[in-house]
Image (cartoon, grey):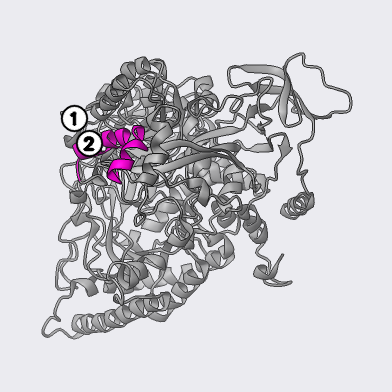
Amino acid sequence: MKRAIGLATAIICATGLVSCGGDNGIESEPENTGSTETAGFDKNPYPSTYEPYPSQPVLLQGATVYDGIGGVFENYDVLLSDGNIAEIGESIEVGDDVDVIDASGKFVTPGIIDNHSHLGVYPSPGVSAHGDGNEISGPVTAEVWAEHSVWPQDPGFTRSLAGGVTSMQILPGSANLFGGRGVIVKNIRARTVQGMKFPDAPYTLKMACGENPKRVYGYGGGGFPGGAPYSRMGNLAGYRNSWIKATEYKQKWDKWEEDGGDMPARDLELDTLKGVLDGDILVHMHCYRVDEMAQIIDMSKEFGYKVSSFHHAVESYKIADKLADEGICSSMWADWWGFKMEAYDGIPENIPMVHNAGACAIVHSDSDIGIQRLNQEAAKALSDGRRVGIEISDADAWTWLTSNPAKSLGIFDQTGSLETGKDADVVLWNTNPFSVYAKAEKVFIDGALMYDLNAPDENAVTDFELGQPGEGDTK
Amino acid sequence: MIRNILALLATSSLAVLGAAAQDVAIDNAKLWTGDRVVEGATLIIQDGKVTAVGPNASIPAGTTTIDADGAWVTPGIFAAYSRMGIVEVSSEVSTNDSAAGASDYSIALDMSDGFNPNETTIDVTRLAGVTRVAVAPGFGSSLFGGQGFIADTSGKPNSITKEKAFTFINLGEGGSGLSGGSRPAAWAKLRAALVDARTYPARYFAHNEGDALSRVDALAFGPASRGSQLILLRVSRASDIREVIELKAENSSLNIALVGAEEGWMVAEELADADIPVIIDPFANLPGRFESLGATQYNAERLIDAGVPTAFSYFDDESHQTRLILQVAGNAVANGVDHEDALRAITTVPARIYGMSGYGSLQTGSAGDVVIWDGDPLEITSAPTKIYIDGVEQSLESRQTRLRDRYLSLDESQKPLAYKR
């Protein structure tokens, strides 16, 4: 059943009828059910233990509201109750039990979702002992899970919270053709990564195109003559070999589910790849160049899966029309370029040009600094687009930060927009968040106030920072 | 709509901008002089220099006059720390001249020998309003990076303003690692190098080589060791900064500025007393290394409040993203820095650090480096509308704008985009 839904959605996406970043049917039947009935083993052995922090009802009153799906409402109220968006409207009446916050002259948005982070797996301080984000040991490491590396004490989490980030995807690094599984978390303080895991979010798979795999395995890490892949064609051969194995593995399991008998032998690497072929695991693929994106799209059709989003897609502007047709998102920086050959054609108008072609545009960070001010990255892209005549409203541009990344992660049914019944992941900005002077004033996650600009004494001090220089300082 | 704008862009790209300085007056400007904001100001540039500035400056007859219509006008932004022009593609070593791990030399490595005015980074940097840039070496196999220089962003063959403007030395964790593995090793090497340079050439007649430096490096370190050239030190930790302050106390002639200084706020008073300026990245707020556990975005405000001459720069990809200096300055304002102090940190303070009087300011006698903006220069949505360097109007094109224009319309019905000219 789950597979059927996944395929049906994938077909709709592939025909370009809707802009579905990656909601391959996941929202209708989350993977994290812990079910062992059909698969014969527990697909979710490290389940989320996330519990929202305690909250009380809050009314944000008289704000300019970007709803994250293209709407803007002046002088509107947003009511957060029981961890959800309870109501959005004009002059909402509330009882005495509701904390009323004057938001006039301020802005309310959904919380920012960064779909490309390495917080926790490359934490601060970046000492050698903390290098847990890249299982470089082989070009195919689909068997590793980023969540098994995440250090919840990373001070980067609290800094990004102050930038209005309420959820993020933590990915393993990009040395490998198949880097491993990503994990989606809510940006809360927790002792364990399980305590941060976004409830019912699907798993994701990180893959990488281009220079990294061939550099690490071909002529860089291994020394001449090195190993494979040594070239871009070697990259493709590597992916295809793995997909062939995964297809055989899936056939074995499908047959077993139908006919019973001895359970097939488990293979962690192929478990993940089969999850992609089943439509349960979403592919997030690091790919800079358009020629490579086109080849990856062909390959995904060859093996029957769909890419949810291309990441670091600095050349998406060159084939934005094709990406729109395929319903594949592009996760982009506003202006990074030139640090490697495949980033040489980066331009500041990439994001608005992708949006303008009707494709799904996402602002991502891949940076512990950039994640703190993704609103500014969107503002740069928006204004650079306008200078060449691409008129995109502020409200539409906010989709780059919340609803589009949520779709690419399969969590849009729960977060990414201000719609009644969704998680109250909300930011109150002290001024227009497209200004360099804007600060997140209050950040709510599931309705709980997790950060308050004006109460610095309340802000989190991570275990690591306790007793160190700068403890408790405003960061 | 887009097509009309494309046509306009195409027209403007054909206009060849003057190669020589033209006399120009900018009228009705909201002018940052480097010292204060003057509303309704007039600025006059003749022969590449500012000849008059102020609300009542009279425009000589026949001078080309631009009505700024109340727009912000500033000196060209002076980026205090960059690798622009010496790195085309960072990860391609054949195009990266910032460091030479296998070289026999260190302090003698002169970055101006690697400067390429045609590099794509230069136009990209200029388009953000940056007209003067300090270009610093990277680090190869020694704590001594080499000689940095100051250049303009015109892309002209003669665009180096000041060669050998400073010697760059890494006293942070990186420098320790390149000195044998510890801070004491780095300091021992630095002190020995100062002696080698100050006693050059005498001791080299007797010994053939110094304790720390080869003949060539000792010669190159001479001016800095005697205080006639700036020493730029990469250092982060408060205790390391105190060591630097002590070094200067013992060698009062040394001319020292710091890069990094993430924990500078913890020793701000001492830095101010020692008159040691700093170049900081206002974004730095993570304990990225143990030497920067105290990092905070309020570093800028605290240093400036204590009276430390403070310049801003963006440290994450200094080759290609020098242009983000304006964004970091805006963020500094969002984190407590006065707007005028933030403008100082990207105009006059860098000029002062590098001993470049007449740059980073718009006063009579200043270089004609001027930017007209379409909004508050520190606001992230603002951009330059006109840029002058030494009085010469600059192109607003880069390889990036050319790529953008090629793909603004994805219509391939006439011929493939890649065959457009």
Name the mark nearer the viewer: 1 or 2: 2
Side of A280 relative to A395 (left or right):
left
Q: Secondary structure at mark 1?
A: loop
* Occupied quadrant, residue B421: bottom right
Q: Is residue B369 magenta?
A: no
Residue type marked 2: Ala
Circle on res. A468 = 1
**Residue under label 2:** B188
Cα distance in 3D space between marks 1 and 2: 28 Å
Magenta stretch?
A: B181-209
- Name the residue: 33% across, 73% down: A218
Q: Nearer the viewer, residue B119 or A381?
A: B119
- Above or below, comparing residue A466 to residue A157 in the picture: above
The answer to whether A305 is drawn above or below residue A149 in the figure is below
Measured as percent of width and height from the top left, residue B262 is found at 33, 31
Give amino acid for label 1: Gln
